Image (cartoon, rainbow, N blue to C red):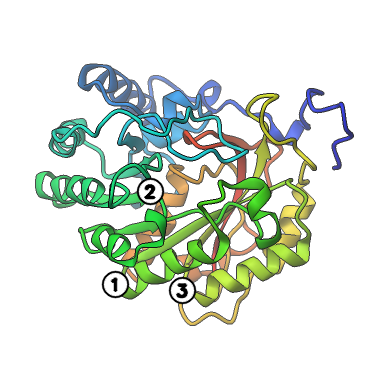
Amino acid sequence: MRVPRGKQRRPKPSWLKHNALRKLDASSVQGQNYLRLKKDVRRLKLATVCEEAKCPNIGECWGGGGGPDEDRVATATVMLMGDTCTRGCRFCSVKTARAPPPLDPAEPQHMAEAVAEWGLDYVVLTSVDRDDIPDGGADHIARTIEALKRETPRLLVECLTPDFSGVRADVARVALSGLDVYAHNVETVERLQRRVRDPRAGYRQTLDVLEWAKAAKPQLVTKTSIMLGLGESAAEVRQTMLDLRGVGVEILTLGQYLRPTKRHMKVEEYVTPEAFAAYQAMVPLNAPISQTSALYPLIDASGFARERSWALHLLRADPWYARPIARGSFSFPTSCALKNNGRSNTLNNPVYII
């Protein structure tokens, strides 16, 4: 659905409206888990994307919902390296500065101890870009992951990383730190990169980062995300899928871009459920790893619980994700979830195993 100029603040389509907390039964196990984790966040003074973004999926993620019963894991997304970014992408509402405050050297161990006490099964780390630091924060992130694994060996860790200015050694430092899922977002199609992202980011550089991570540790699951509604064509999205598959990416999320403020780039189109279904049909199925894809509602690129179950099965080489239930059994949502992971406002709908 095209958005006419001057109409950016009109009501969003019905399929973009959702509040999962209204559906959460506080007396259920899932509801009790949510309330316990919410209390622990305050006590441990953790900064979570889940709350800062007011994500409507928070009840399911913190409660441990989604996926088969045996894989209902409690999930949260925590931020590293402060709240100030050195880059200025046009879709992103995070505050920026040329010289943010210095890193806290105690953060890796504090984070590990807090997450261990929090009792998570699966943690997602994300961070701002720190071009003011020689390695872009790679060693800081890697030490955090190492501390998390040391404190909680059973913990699975996903990290949405910066591009480290395209330095391969820094990518490898994070990839070899014990990480389970290496995520780095391509954000949009190649043609729109300069209009959407900071000039220091780039399409080919993102592909290189994802390829280098997989080369450093072949068993690492790699993941990325594309925002839709920025003026891209279906053919460009398909080409991006093929390029991502070419560098070994296994998990791809697609989401509707939402404009955070009037100062940010405008929404060009609200992508309909039918259009998302068409994107599912064009997922490349000739890949050697997975021969299927999935479409289901309420995906957040940095922390949705059901998406964690897909990563779990990829990590375990479990054939569950390739069973017939993976295609066509999940109906497209009449409402979708808000992603605001400290970087953007996006509505993420499907996740694809490509």
Precedes in sequence: disc 3 or disc 2: 2
Q: Residues within 10 Å of mark 1 (few under 14, many from 20)?
A: some
**Is label 3 in a helix, a strand or a loop?**
loop
Disc 3 versus disc 2: nearer the observer: 3
Question: Of helix, strand and loop, which one carries label 1?
Answer: helix
Q: Is residue 307 something that shows in the picture? A: yes
- Decide: is 306 above or below 208: above
Spatial CA distance of label 1 from label 2 is 33 Å
Q: Are marks 3 and 2 in contact (CB under 8 Å)?
A: no
Asked if marks 3 and 1 touch (Cβ < 8 Å), the reply is no
Q: Nearer the viewer, residue 326 or 107?
A: 107
For label 2, the residue is: 69
In the rendered structure, which disc, 1 or 2, sits on the residue that comes first in sequence?
A: 2
Q: Residues within 10 Å of mark 3 (few under 14, many from 20)?
A: many
Task: Give the CA separation, mark 3 to mark 1.
Answer: 12 Å
Extreme-right residue of the structure: 4
Q: Residue at x 13, y 51 (%)?
A: 153
Which marked residue is nearer to the observer: mark 3 or mark 1? 1
Residue 216, numbered label = 1
- The vertical placement of 312 against 300, above or below, is below
Rendering coords of residue 48 (x, y %): 36, 29
Instruction: Residue type at mark 2: give it.
Output: Asp
Label of residue 248 in the image: 3
* Res 218 seen here: no
Front residue of this view, candidates 283 and 174: 174
Q: Earlier in the sequence, mark 3 or mark 1?
A: 1
Element assignment for label 2: helix
Q: Relative to residue 314, is residue 102 drawn left or right? A: left
The residue under the point 72% across, 54% down is 276
